[in-house]
Amino acid sequence: SNQGAAAALVATGGIITQYVDSGTTYRVHTFRGSGKFVVASGAANVDYLIIAGGAAGGDTGSGKVTGGGGAGALRTSTGHAVSAGSYTITVGAGGNRTPGYTSVSDGDSSAALGMTITGGGRGGRGNSNGTNSTDGSGGGAGAEASDYSYTGGTSGSYGFDGGDANGTGGDYFAGGGGGASAVGADATTSAGGDGGAGTTGYGVTAATPTYAGGGGGAASLDTTGAPPATGGSGGGGQAYSKDETGAEQGHGAVPNTGSGGGGGGQGTDGGDGATGIVIIRYEVA
């Protein structure tokens, strides 16, 4: 981006790193938790990445499987003017699998430099649609033996829809949560839906990491196992599947990616969603 030739920026806040990309030196402030971006002096045009918290996979009961959590909203911007002052940075927490089922988006909001975005929609429990999201991605639909006709949650402006549930008789499968660049996959009659893919954004080096993948939808089969639905690229949590041993818990999303947690199996809940992140960068001499 065109950073301009304003007086050199002197700023604190977050984890500060620096790298060179194509001959340009960037200083980076990374917030993995809430804090302050404080400009002591100078002015500059900065680039930013803001990702809200990802939602958890749905909570469940006996005989049900749950959808993957939707990724939190992701926004990037270039050329945002800042000058001396203190800027509050809020990093949204990921959705937690332990509270009871909620019908609202449960990945918390993140905010920086005048922009606020909300988290993803929670994965549907075993007898419900996926949850919608105000800004982020929708949660995948849950399923149960007696009914697998539920639909994925819808996305906001900065995410994608969750996948639908499916099944045949006693075999039933949940949808994947939406990601930042793709819808969560619909379940088939033999497997849960994979989480929607994430997208790339600024990082602490010249590499561009992938963030905000949706969680995979869980699967249940009467007699044989199904391969676990994968989380979307960028950190989405893998779903539980009956071919796994031990607890039927969905897998949690990768921290500080804003990704959704994987759906849970019969009698347990989905995995936790991931905390968001805020990254601010600018050119230095």
Image: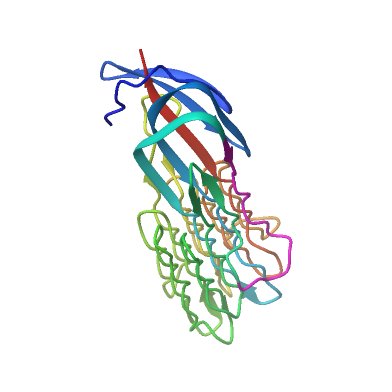
Q: Is residue 209 visible?
A: no
Rendered residue at 50%/54% (across/down): 117
Question: Where in the figure is residue 238, as x and y percent of width and height?
Answer: 53, 53
Rendered residue at 54%/61% (across/down): 69
Task: Judge from the rendering whether residue 120 lies leftward or rightward of residue 56; answer left or right.
Answer: left
Is residue 93 part of the magenta span, yes or no?
yes
| Chain part drawn in magenta | 87-103
Query: Toward the viewer: 171 or 280?
Result: 280
Question: Where in the figure is residue 175, as x and y percent of width and height?
Answer: 48, 69
- Dividing the picture into quarters, in which one does residue 248 lie? bottom right
Query: Toward the viewer: 124 or 186?
Result: 124
Question: Where in the figure is residue 220, as x and y percent of width and height?
Answer: 57, 70
42 in relation to 159, above or below:
above
Rendered residue at 31%/27% (across/down): 3
Task: Check the image and name the residue furthest to the top.
Answer: 285
- Quarter holding the N terminus? top left
Q: Main secondary structure of the magenta part?
A: loop
- Quarter holding the C terminus? top left
Rendered residue at 59%/82% (across/down): 145
Query: Toward the viewer: 145 or 210?
Result: 210
Query: Toward the viewer: 158 or 71?
Result: 158
- Dividing the picture into quarters, in which one does residue 282 lie? top left
205 in relation to 214, above or below:
above
55 in relation to 167, above or below:
above
103 in relation to 17, above or below:
below
Q: How is the image coloured?
A: rainbow
Q: Is residue 70 visible?
A: yes
Is residue 83 part of the magenta span, yes or no?
no
